[in-house]
Amino acid sequence: MKIIYDVAVIGAGPAGTSAAEVTARNDLHTLVLDRRRKVGAPVQCGELIPTPSEARRLFPNSTRMSKAVNVPAEFITNQTQVIRLISPNGKSFEFPFEANIVDRSRYDQYLADSAENVGAEIQLDSTVINRSITNELKVKTKNSVQTINSRLVIGADGSKSVVARSLGPRFIQPESDLSPALQYVMSDVDIDPTIVEMYFGSSIAPGGYAWVIPKGEGIANIGFGMRRSIGGDMTPLKRYIERFAFNTLAQKTKNAKILQRVGAIIPVGGPLKTTWSNNVILVGDAAGHVMASNGGGIPTALCGGQIAGENVVNHLTKNASLSLYERKWRSEYGLELETALQVLRVADTVMPSDTLTDICMNLAGVRFLEPLIRCRLPLPISLASKTLVKALNWFL
Ligand SMILES: Cc1cc2nc3c(=O)[nH]c(=O)nc-3n(C[C@H](O)[C@H](O)[C@H](O)COP(=O)(O)OP(=O)(O)OC[C@H]3O[C@@H](n4cnc5c(N)ncnc54)[C@H](O)[C@@H]3O)c2cc1C
């Protein structure tokens, strides 16, 4: 007998499992598919999540973000208090920023367990290779290709989303906005456990930045994200991370060991213009829900997943329009995502030159840099940036 699920969620990351928890809890027959063999592994993340009070400051319009990022204490390995920005010529700018550093592999598993506990089925080692317009999914498993049917599909399958691709070109994030990122997890790193560092510079991370995120007990996530479209040459990514970890951070890493190497993509092109169709919703990285100026996407994945789940429930049980999903996430965190993109586009105009970056960071100072990292534009910069981007577009 052919099973037709109410909801098929593609991707068991924080967006997908948060959505599945809501749909399954509301008695919708929910299946989560993920190509990985183990939820959350390998970890491809800096693991930094703003604390609930910081999230309230980051997303002042959101009624639910602070609750969404309230990670249970057992998954928090460290708490940081400060962000330090380091300009290409080595000048530091610091401001307070409270974050939890989370063991993501265990936390992602906990989110998946929470969905499973209320009835969601989770099927791993299952790669969705195709979705038809009627939501027939072709799924490659270890030994076969399965066909799965679902009334509604939630695409939570990350930046290279197969679900988004199945909806057509306007749902596909341009390659130039997909930032490749590499990270080493290192032990015996000599760092202040309360400070997160972000390094800028064309030889460190062209079109992006490099980070040091202390996980506690001398372990740190040390990585970088870049875009070749913004001043990057064809230097292999591995050379950037080696240079950063062992030259730029030589003092901190002289006794350090590499525990793990990870690589992945961060989508920094801002949210898709449309994140739903008549029988699909896109959420998390698949919807471009990442703060483009800092690459953070866990808070919006958690919050957006819940909103997606609720709207799918209302759609399938009360015939409510799926467009309400888009209206809701935009009211919760849309402004911050759009502002972060604006910040990035302005940064793109200065980042290819280290001298310009140094001048701009010096001129801005902590008073202006802090709101930029928090996805807010101080008014004079907002006006100036629009004019600058317009002028440059005209000039180029
Ligand atoms: C190196 C790096 C560091 C980062 N650091 C931070 C950070 O410190 N803080 C922060 O907030 N954000 C960070 N991010 C971003 C953050 O990891 C993502 O925004 C977040 O994980 C998005 O959640 P998601 O559920 O949308 O996608 P994901 O967590 O990527 O989950 C998508 C899931 O879909 C599955 N999948 C993909 N395609 C298919 C398919 N065809 N079939 C079946 N399954 C599929 C994948 O296996 C995966 O499990 C970082 C990203 C990277 C790459």
Image (cartoon, rainbow, N blue to C red):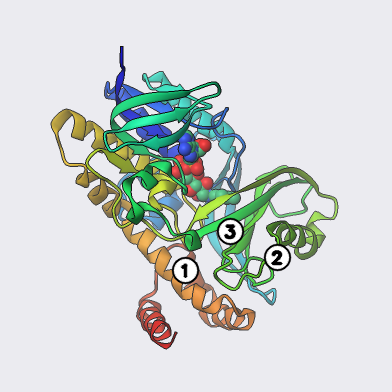
Question: What residue appears at the point 56 percent right and 75 percent down from the top-left corner?
Answer: 351
- Residue that label 1 marks: 344
Circles 2 and 1: CB atoms closer than 8 Å: no
Disc 2, ligand 1: is the CB inside 8 Å? no
Farthest top residue? 1
- Residue that label 2 marks: 235
Q: Nearer the viewer, mark 3 or mark 2?
A: 2
Which quadrant of the view contains residue 310? top left
Farthest right residue? 255
- Residue that label 3 marks: 82
Q: CA distance from mark 1 to mark 3?
A: 22 Å
Q: Is residue 346 above or below residue 68?
A: below
Q: CA distance from mark 2 to mark 1?
A: 23 Å
Quick one: quadrant of the N terminus?
A: top left
- Residue 25 in the image: x percent, y percent? 31, 24
* Residue 5 seen from this side: yes
Residue type beneath disc 3: Val
The reply, left or right, for residue 8 in relation to residue 186 is left
The reply, left or right, for residue 340 in relation to residue 329 is right
- Residue 11 in the image: x percent, y percent? 45, 35
Which of these two is toward me, 143 or 242? 143
- Residue 286 in the image: x percent, y percent? 41, 47
Which of these two is toward me, 94 or 143? 143
Q: Nearer the viewer, mark 2 or mark 1?
A: 2
Q: Secondary structure at mark 1?
A: helix
Residue type beneath disc 1: Leu
Question: What residue appears at the point 54 percent right and 81 percent down from the top-left corner?
Answer: 360
Which quadrant of the view contains residue 324? top left
Question: What residue appears at the point 39 percent right and 74 percent down from the top-left corner?
Answer: 378
- Residue 305 in the image: x percent, y percent? 36, 39
